[in-house]
Image: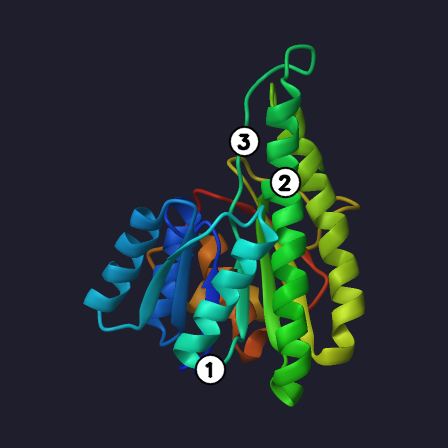
Amino acid sequence: MNLNIENKVAIVTGGGKGLGSTVAKLLGQNGVKVAVNDINPDRAEKVADSIRSSGGQAIGIGADIANKFQCVHLIETTRAEWGQLDILVNHAAVEPQATILKMDEWDWQRCLDVNLKGAFFMSQLVGRVMADENEARGGSIINLGRTAGLLLPLESRAAYCASQAGLVGFARECAREFQTYGIRVNTILQHQTSLTTGPLVDEIPSQISSWLKEQQLESPIAAQIVLALCSEMGHQISGTVIPVDDQAIMG
């Protein structure tokens, strides 16, 4: 199946390491022009350079997405480079570790600022651009998180759990509101153990599941699902919350 995502433009926040880096590189390998964001500009540029070295198009942009003005800088730099914006992957997150009784207020607030307010800033600002400029082309916003706070607790990470539960609720409302503009919003939640679905999560959509089983891709399922959601396969999918084993590879 031809994914038809060549020459689309994406921003990947927190793209300097981990799954964000994997997603940025996979998008670049499939013809997407990628703005790799990280709070550390050297990490962002390193991933962007890797994409360029493989024949793709990418730029690295240092920005703290908890700061609205830096979010504007990230978005406008991307638009200045390529003139459009089609995909947003919200991956940037922090995960302070402390018991509730000992957690410092600064750590709690910083976690919510990056993980939840940052997703709000980026979704709002990118959503405005897509709504104003993309018309029938629409757009895709994908949030990457974990099941912490939804299906399972996570020891000494109360702030992170709160941010992840909030992200899911926020993303569902984004999906409802943005559908008018053809903007799809979906959330992928990782965990290291196999999960059954519950009242807060959905199955992998059947058309994507079938496509995954046909592939021989050597990358985590979560990254492959991002790719599928950005493609024509994802045009009718919005408002889903998809749990995956973050170590699994299909193929």
Helix, strand or loop for disc 2: helix
Distance from Cα at disc 1 to Cα at disc 2: 29 Å
Which residue is tagged 1?
83
* Mark 3 Cα shell of 10 Å, populated few (<14), some (14-19), many (≥20): some
Looking at the image, which residue sits at the far left?
53
| Image location of residue 108, percent across then percent down | 65, 27
| Image location of residue 131, percent across then percent down | 68, 78
Dot 3 and dot 1 residues touching (CB under 8 Å): no
Q: Residue at x 62, y 75 (%)?
A: 129
Distance from Cα at disc 3 to Cα at disc 1: 34 Å
Q: Residue at x 46, y 79 (%)?
A: 8
Name the amino acid type tagged 2: Asp
| Image location of residue 163, percent across then percent down | 67, 38
Point out the image quarter for the C terminus.
bottom left
Q: Is residue 237 visible?
A: no
Which residue is tagged 2?
113
Marks 2 and 3: which is nearer the front?
2
Helix, strand or loop for disc 1: loop
Which residue is tagged 3?
95
Position of residue 111 relative to residue 251, above or below, is: above
Quadrant in the rendering for residue 202? bottom right
The answer to whether residue 7 is left or right of residue 157 is left
Dot 1 and dot 2 residues touching (CB under 8 Å): no
Q: Earlier in the sequence, mark 3 or mark 1?
A: 1
Point out the image quarter for the N terminus.
bottom left
| Image location of residue 102, percent across then percent down | 64, 11
Q: Is residue 116 visible?
A: yes
Helix, strand or loop for disc 3: loop
Name the amino acid type tagged 1: Gly
Looking at the image, which residue sits at the far front?
69
